[in-house]
Image: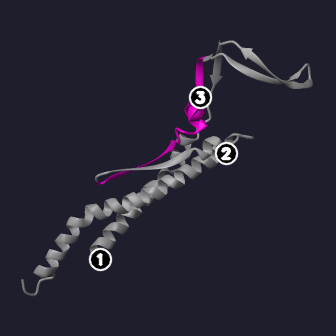
Amino acid sequence: MSGGLVDAGGLERLRDRLAGLPAVIAATLADGMRVQAQALAAAAGARLDGQVKGGTGTLSRALIPTLTVNGLAATAGVTVDEASPAAAYAAFQEYGFHGTESVRAHLRTITQAFGRSIAPVSVPVHAYDRRVDYDGHPFLAPTLADHTDSMRAAVADAISAAVTNQLSS
């Protein structure tokens, strides 16, 4: 087509670029989501550390950013390291618990009796049930809510950058 805006070779190059666009967007999006997952884990840990005065920090250190890529989709998240001692109480901390808990028999070491220090003594404690009313202190859900807008903007920026780079190269 003589005098047209796009010659046949240009049309072919554009078609190739458009065909490669989904893969480029997916790769760019995965990179952006990885960064967002790391930021989300750091913010959740900071929120948790700010809530629990005198805490050990075990739960905040056990937060792991995750990225799942399935074809052209990428999902960022935060999980708790199941090998960590914090894994046992992460849900308890996030959601709270109201109900009866069974405490198994165990040994307790006492180092004081009647307000005075004594040599450590192991005392058996029998199994029992106890009532728990703990409202929980959410740290993951509020962090996600706080970062939703910035995460959406990051996704939009990543897609825009991928399209611009793919079509201009």
SS state under label 3: loop
Q: Earlier in the sequence, mark 2 or mark 3?
A: 2
Q: Name the image quarter holding residue 161.
A: bottom left
**Side of 71 where 123 appears, left or right:** right
Residue at image position (58%, 51%) is: 43
- Residue 45 location in percent, x, y? 61, 47
Q: CA distance from mark 2 to mark 3?
A: 17 Å
Residue at image position (57%, 35%) is: 90
The label shown at residue 96 is: 3
Amino acid type at image mark 3:
Gly
Q: Is residue 135 above or below residue 163?
A: above
Q: Is residue 12 above or below residue 136?
A: below
- Residue 17 location in percent, x, y? 22, 71
Residue at image position (11%, 83%) is: 4
Look at the image and say whether residue 98 sits in the magenta stretch: yes
Magenta residues, start to end? 72-101
Badge 2 crowding class, 10 Å Cα cut-off, few under 14, some 14 to 19, many 20 or more, is some
Q: CA distance from mark 2 to mark 1?
A: 45 Å
The label shown at residue 168 is: 1
Amino acid type at image mark 1:
Ser
Which quadrant would the C terminus be assigned to in this image?
A: bottom left
Badge 1 crowding class, 10 Å Cα cut-off, few under 14, some 14 to 19, many 20 or more, is few
Q: Earlier in the sequence, mark 3 or mark 1?
A: 3
**Disc 2: which residue:** 49
Q: Nearer the viewer, residue 149 or 45?
A: 45
